[in-house]
Amino acid sequence: MRRIDKERVVLAIAAPLLALIAAFLLTALVLAATGKEPFNAFSIMFEYGSKSDSQVYILNKGTGYFLAGLAVAIGFRMNLFNIGVDGQYRLAAFLAAVVGGALSLPGFVQIPLIILVAMLVGAMWASIAGLLKVYRGVSEVISTIMLNFLATTLIGYLLVDGRLAVLDKESGVVSTEPLPESSHFFTIPAGPGLDPIWGFIVVAALAGLGYWFLLARTRFGFDLRAVGRSESAARASGVDVKRMIITSMVLSGAVAGLVGMPTVLNDTHQFTADFPTGVGFTGIAIALLGRNNPVGIALAAALWTFLERGAGKLEFEGYDKEIVGVMQGVIVLCVVISYELVRRFALKRQQQRVGAELAAQAKKKEVAA
């Protein structure tokens, strides 16, 4: 491996490592300031998070976080901030559950149909923001935030007994029609006494592979990254920037539609009023932590879920569970700062190498003369 390649690998590892060390040190200071013993808290979290049932929990819940991070990362690659992943995945999961509950087809037909409906709904909802940005100049940040509220309102209106939901008289819970057993996604046994691993993790892995291939090995991915770097330069090279913006938002929304599928197909098998919320916003932090790289996003999703898992145990041991939220926020800030420091260091090193090469060439010319 060449020296420059080794240096790139070292810098790529140094940034997240520096961020994690700084985050744990700052969190330790916060714990110490509140009169708590920091290293005992970390020991409790690591011990609890390393247990088998916690590892299954991290894999299952982290699947949705990973997909949310991918959805956000597609927009980030274009300098688009899709803040509406939360509304997109909830509306997609709701309508997909409605369709799934209304049909009774063989599993090999119904499961792909439910997934397709979710992706189409997410894509269509996200495309609204893309169209508003291209044809009316509306910031995607504002439009996607407003679309989140619209999605929540629409779900609240339709999730009523007699509309697109039914009331369970025994429990008093209003939900969509339960999915037939043929629509239940497969699970992977994790061991005696443990919950199974949700099979949708396989779909998430394929989505991550597709994301990498699309961006790194296709002309579309090159155009997308080019527009993200400089719209004017991309336009001058013949890229249709407006089309790329709309397409990117549609792809981001389609992936967002998958976020709720692990819960619908592997867990609840229906949509209720207490369906998980906030996953889309968590995806923003995870995409930042993972630097829009599928492997980095997977690791960030696992870390985020691990910290959430530890929050409950810390509260049980007498610690404030909010300390995990502080830790998560500090990690995000440290990652942003550390990557900027590493970027500046790498730029300085590159300038030094270029300067050294120019000086060497000048010296050779003097000797030749």
Image: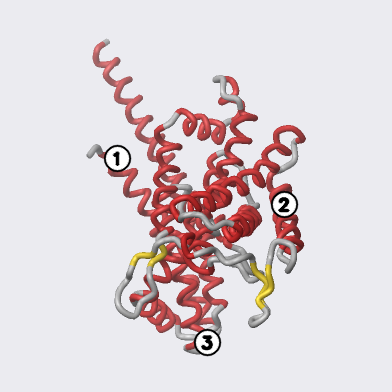
Disc 2 marks which residue? 147
Image-quadrant location for residue 87: bottom right
Q: Residue at x 72, y 52 (%)?
A: 147
Q: Amino acid at mark 3?
A: Gly
Q: Are marks 2 and 3 in contact (CB under 8 Å)?
A: no
Mark 3–mark 1 distance (CA, rounded to whole Å): 46 Å
260 relative position to 300: left or right = right
Res. 199 image quadrant? bottom left
Secondary element under disc 3, as helix, strand or loop, is loop
Q: As rendered, which of 211 and 2 lies closer to the eye?
A: 211
> Label 3 belongs to which residue?
35
**Residue in the picture at 68% in, 69% down:** 166
Give the percent coordinates (x, y) of residue 98.
Answer: 63, 58
Q: Residue under label 1, please give it.
A: 5
Q: Secondary structure at mark 2?
A: helix
**Image color mode:** secondary structure
Q: Report the quarter where the N terminus lies.
A: top left
Rendered position, 345 above or below 166: above
